[in-house]
Amino acid sequence: MFEKFGEMNSFQEINELAENLFNEGDIGSLKAMAAENGIPEDFVEMFCSGDLPVLCDATTAAIGKIEVEAAKMKPKEIMEDWTEYLRSQCMENELLAYSVRKKGKSLKGCIAALLMWSFKNQQTVDKGIIKAAGISAGKVTLGIPGMARAKQIITDYYMGDIKK
């Protein structure tokens, strides 16, 4: 990820580079930079034709970053749900979208924050449940956050309030 142009800290940085590449006539690099940042190709076309004054806004840049990271990480099941929640929140909360784009913040780091909470908050599963599940282990623990807790962990991670 971000191999050619590096991780950009904001949608403004993406737009500044897009403007410079466009002014230099380097449309190939503009398309490559947009693809690397998850900006749809049709946005590049509209930007180049003058139909869009800038290549992206905070939401588009955040969703693009999430899409690129998710494509590499390939989240499944609950991690996919958490990723979808993050996407939807970026559409509703511009400050969160801006924070998602920050250097050093990543979907992998966000999932890691959820995993850390999960390990710290494991609960012993009732023996009757273990038996009903057909599990022969003597002790089973589970620590998956509920959706309200997961939403808070996700927000705290990207907004900078996560405590390690």
Image (spheres, rainbow, N blue to C red):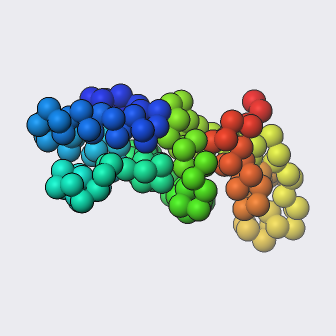
Is residue 91 placed above or below 39 in the rendered structure? below
Q: Residue at the spot x=87%, y=67% of the render?
A: 128
Residue 75 on image: x %, y %: 49, 53
User: Does residue 114 appear left or right of residue 73 in this picture?
Assistant: right
Tag count: 0
Q: Residue at the spot x=82%, y=46% of the render?
A: 121
Residue 131 on image: x %, y %: 80, 66
Is residue 1 placed above or below 53 in the rendered structure? above
Q: Quadrant of the C terminus?
A: top right
User: Does residue 160 appear left or right of residue 26 in this picture?
Assistant: right
Residue lying at the far bottom of the rendered structure: 132
Q: Residue at the spot x=88%, y=61% of the render?
A: 126
Q: Quadrant of the N terminus?
A: top left
* Quarter of the rendering containing residue 98: top right
Of 68 and 34, which appears nearest the observer?
A: 34
Q: Does residue 70 appear in this view? A: no
Is residue 129 placed above or below 141 in the rendered structure? below
Q: Does residue 42 appear in this view? A: yes
Residue 37 on image: x %, y %: 35, 43
User: Does residue 63 appear left or right of residue 104 in this picture?
Assistant: left
Residue 20 on image: x %, y %: 24, 33
Q: Residue at the spot x=60%, y=49% of the render?
A: 96
